[in-house]
Image (cartoon, rainbow, N blue to C red):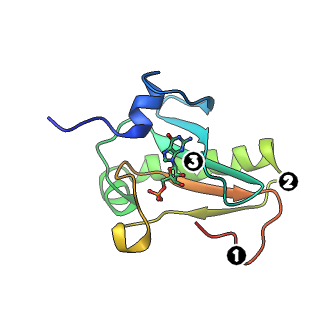
Amino acid sequence: MTEPSIFTRILNGDVPGEIIASTGKLFAIRDISPQAPVHLLVIPKTEQYRDVTELAAGDPELLAELIAFAGELAGDHADGDFRLVFNTGANAGQTVFHVHAHVLAGGLTETSLV
Ligand code: 5GP
């Protein structure tokens, strides 16, 4: 039995973290270490998909929902423009293997990468 991810623990209220929005299958939190004026994480409530390639193969509709939700959040928290980043694999900087999208918004510079 593997440990729940940090995001599952936040979703379940087992560690502190404000859920700023949610849908039936997705939720959003603020990144604890923001790399842009607005830096949100959009996360499926299930942690069965480790990264975006698994999500795309296993549930492409949920991936489309995630992208639409990211756009809504960028409109609610910034001017609607956003950058969507999926770090995929440890060598690309992924540290949490429960698929999530970084939503970066609010005035970006070329260095606003995660
Ligand atoms: P990754 O590196 O896997 O693409 O992204 C994981 C992100 O989760 C990082 O940007 C990191 O700052 C964020 N993160 C890690 N632990 C926590 C936490 O406990 N709370 C919140 N809100 N974000 C976290």
Whether ligand 1 has any atom under 8 Å from the Cβ at mark 1 is answered as: no
Say how many tags the image has: 3
For the point 58% across and 53% down, the residue is: 67
Label 2: how many residues lie within 10 Å, few (<14), some (14-19) or many (20+)? few
Q: Which of marks 1 and 2 is nearer the N terminus?
A: 2
For the point 57% across and 47% down, the residue is: 41
Q: Earlier in the sequence, mark 1 or mark 3?
A: 3
Whether ligand 1 has any atom under 8 Å from the Cβ at mark 3 is answered as: yes
Q: Mark 2 points at which residue?
A: 79
Task: Identify residue type, mark 1.
Answer: Thr
Label 1: how many residues lie within 10 Å, few (<14), some (14-19) or many (20+)? few
- Contact between marks 1 and 2 (CB within 8 A): the answer is no
Q: Name the residue under label 1.
A: 111
For the point 60% across and 38% down, the residue is: 29
Q: Which of marks 1 and 3 is in front?
A: 1
- Mark number, residue 41: 3
In the rendered image, the quadrant that contains the N terminus is top left
Residue 62 location in percent, x, y?
45, 46
Task: Identify residue type, mark 3.
Answer: Leu
In the rendered image, the quadrant that contains the C terminus is bottom right
Task: Identify residue type, mark 2.
Answer: Asp
